[in-house]
């Protein structure tokens, strides 16, 4: 019983944790962090950084010596040269060679040093590109987040308008029962209630679509539950009229990663010229070699087999020795058999070493080095132009963002004045309607005008908030509400 109660308690606690987790609301910072961790484009940018780091490892390892072992085996047959007698014969011969080779570059026109310098710049540029991808995703998530907040705000307004219309219907019914209004006055209210109900459905759909867009940016499954925080939309305390293009642009040049990546790539392209020039300079390298060989027909002359040996005398030839006649005969030993030299003995006998220095002086290589130099210089020009285009686009974006922020402030001020005036007008219309001074159509018209003013005010508030946040983003500030 105790174990069963304990398990029941554990399952209940787990269910509560899951329920609380499902109901947990997401802040803008949390949404951006989750999207950054799961974005495919950012993961691709991180792979690009890792690829640049791997290339840099190769650049550094190029300073180290190389060491390679090699072995080969073969079999010759037919008319071949006997390695023991160095004459042609029809026989089969097996062979094997083993070698160990090493080499190191001593000088190659600073190619390795410049490649390492370039690798550092390429890694930094790749990281800046990854940060730019994070920034772009953060902006998109912030826009989607605010869009959901705006849709939920509009949904609350639509529900409030529906409640107001229903309350207005109750008041109209009371006036009709009291004889102050005609029966047909309620149909105008009923039409307004139907319109308000349709607006609620539309805004509910907008909220659903807004969440789907946000989930898509965050790489969340559409069926997974997501509820964002609903903070009070505090308008920025910064007056956008104080934004100046020169000041914001200067800040953006030092904070925006796309500009930093462009500057790094220009320096990397400049090193391409030095790397290409290395192909026109002499290169010096040190090499060494260890080698040995084996041949199946090699004979061991130090260990003859004399079992079948015979001493044979040749024909006698008359000669004179110290003026005296004599006969001289040549003696030959035949039937001597020499065994094959052992494999290990041959490896020891044939073991040799070599060491040397190699100097390569390029004289003419089909203008490849000249073309490489020209392409490197053109790449510098193209990289500089690309960076200039990015800077021009950044300045245009900042100029547009500042203009949008200032215009959004003016639109917000106008929306606030309109909402205040129409609120007073609607309150007055309600009082007059209660006294029977105006009809239902006039009251509904006043209500619709106020509702539209509130919608415009909500749009203006969110638009102003987002436009100011964009300018602050270019100033290097963190996106947050």
Image (tube, rainbow, N blue to C red):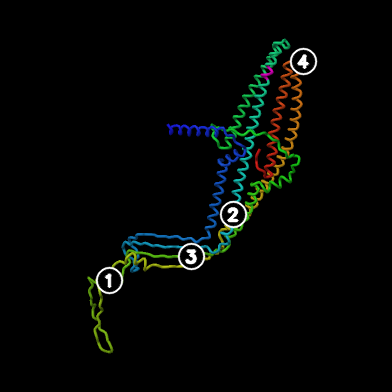
From the viewer's perspective, is the residue at label 3 or at label 1 nearer? 3
Which disc is residue 304 wearing? 1
Q: Marks 1 and 4, how far apart in space?
A: 141 Å
Residues in magenta? 165-169
- Residue at numbered disc 3: 287
Nearest-to-viewer mark from 3 and 4: 4
Q: Name the main secondary structure of what is drawn in magenta.
A: helix
Whether the residues at callouts 3 and 2 have beta carbons within 8 Å, the answer is: no
Query: Is label 2 in contact with label 1 (beta carbons under 8 Å)?
Result: no
Which numbered circle lies on residue 120?
A: 2
Mark 3 or 2 closer to N-term?
2
Using the image as rendered, state which of residue 64 and residue 389 is in the foreground: 64
Inter-mark Cα distance, 3 to 2? 30 Å
The local crowd at label 1, few if under 14, some if 14 to 19, many if 20 or more residues have their Cα within 10 Å, is few
Is disc 2 in contact with disc 4, using a CB cutoff of under 8 Å? no
**Disc 3 element:** strand
Identify the image quadrant of the C terminus. top right
As drawn, the label of residue 437 is 4
Residue ID at (75%, 27%) = 420
Judge from the rendering whether residue 369 lies leftward or rightward of residue 68; answer left or right: right
Chain-order first, disc 2 or disc 1: 2
Dot 3: few (<14), some (14–19), or many (≥20) neighbours within 10 Å?
Answer: some
The location of residue 296, given as percent across then percent down, is: 32, 63
Left of 450 or right of it: where is 364?
A: left
Residue closer to the observer: 238 or 358: 238
């Amino acid at each position: 019983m105790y174990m069963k109660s304990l398990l029941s308690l554990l399952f209940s606690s787990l269910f509560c944790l899951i329920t609380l987790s499902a109901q947990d609301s997401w802040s803008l910072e949390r949404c951006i962090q989750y999207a950054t961790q799961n974005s495919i484009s950012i993961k691709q940018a991180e792979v690009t950084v890792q690829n640049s780091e791997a290339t840099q490892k190769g650049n550094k390892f190029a300073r180290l010596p190389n060491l390679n072992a090699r072995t080969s085996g073969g079999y010759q047959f037919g008319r071949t040269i006997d390695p023991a007698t160095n004459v042609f014969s029809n026989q089969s011969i097996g062979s094997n060679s083993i070698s160990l080779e090493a080499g190191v570059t001593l000088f190659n026109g600073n190619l390795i040093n410049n490649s390492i310098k370039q690798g550092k710049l390429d890694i930094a540029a790749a990281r800046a590109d990854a940060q730019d991808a994070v920034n772009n995703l953060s902006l998109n998530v912030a826009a989607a987040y605010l869009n959901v907040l705006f849709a939920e705000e509009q949904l609350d307004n639509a529900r409030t308008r529906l409640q107001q219309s229903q309350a207005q219907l109750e008041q109209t019914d009371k006036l009709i029962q009291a004889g102050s209004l005609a029966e047909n006055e309620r149909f105008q209210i009923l039409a307004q209630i139907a319109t308000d109900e349709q607006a609620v459905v539309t805004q509910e759909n907008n909220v659903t679509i807004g969440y789907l867009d946000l989930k898509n940016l965050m790489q969340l499954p559409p069926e997974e539950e997501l509820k964002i925080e609903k903070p009070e939309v505090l308008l920025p305390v910064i007056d956008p009229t104080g934004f100046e293009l020169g000041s914001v642009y200067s800040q953006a040049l030092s904070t925006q990663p796309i500009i930093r990546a462009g500057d790094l790539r220009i320096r990397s392209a400049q090193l391409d010229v030095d790397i290409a020039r290395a192909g026109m300079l002499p290169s010096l390298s040190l090499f060494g070699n260890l080698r040995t060989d084996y041949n199946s027909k090699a004979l061991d002359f130090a260990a003859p087999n004399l079992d079948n040996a015979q001493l044979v005398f040749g024909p006698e030839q008359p000669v004179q020795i110290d003026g005296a006649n004599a006969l001289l005969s040549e003696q030959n030993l035949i039937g001597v058999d020499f065994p094959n030299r052992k494999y290990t003995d041959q490896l020891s006998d044939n073991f040799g070493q070599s060491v040397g220095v190699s100097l390569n002086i390029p004289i003419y290589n089909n203008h490849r080095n000249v073309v490489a130099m020209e392409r490197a210089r053109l790449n510098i020009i193209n990289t500089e132009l690309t960076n200039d285009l990015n800077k021009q686009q950044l300045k245009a974006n900042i100029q547009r963002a500042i203009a949008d922020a200032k215009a959004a402030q003016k639109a917000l001020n106008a929306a606030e004045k309109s909402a205040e005036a129409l609120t007073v007008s609607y309150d007055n219309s309600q009082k007059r309607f209660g006294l029977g001074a105006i009809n239902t159509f006039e009251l509904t018209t006043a209500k619709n005008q106020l509702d539209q003013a509130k919608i415009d005010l909500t749009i203006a508030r969110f638009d102003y908030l987002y436009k100011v946040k964009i300018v602050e983003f270019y100033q290097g500030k963190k996106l947050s509400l």
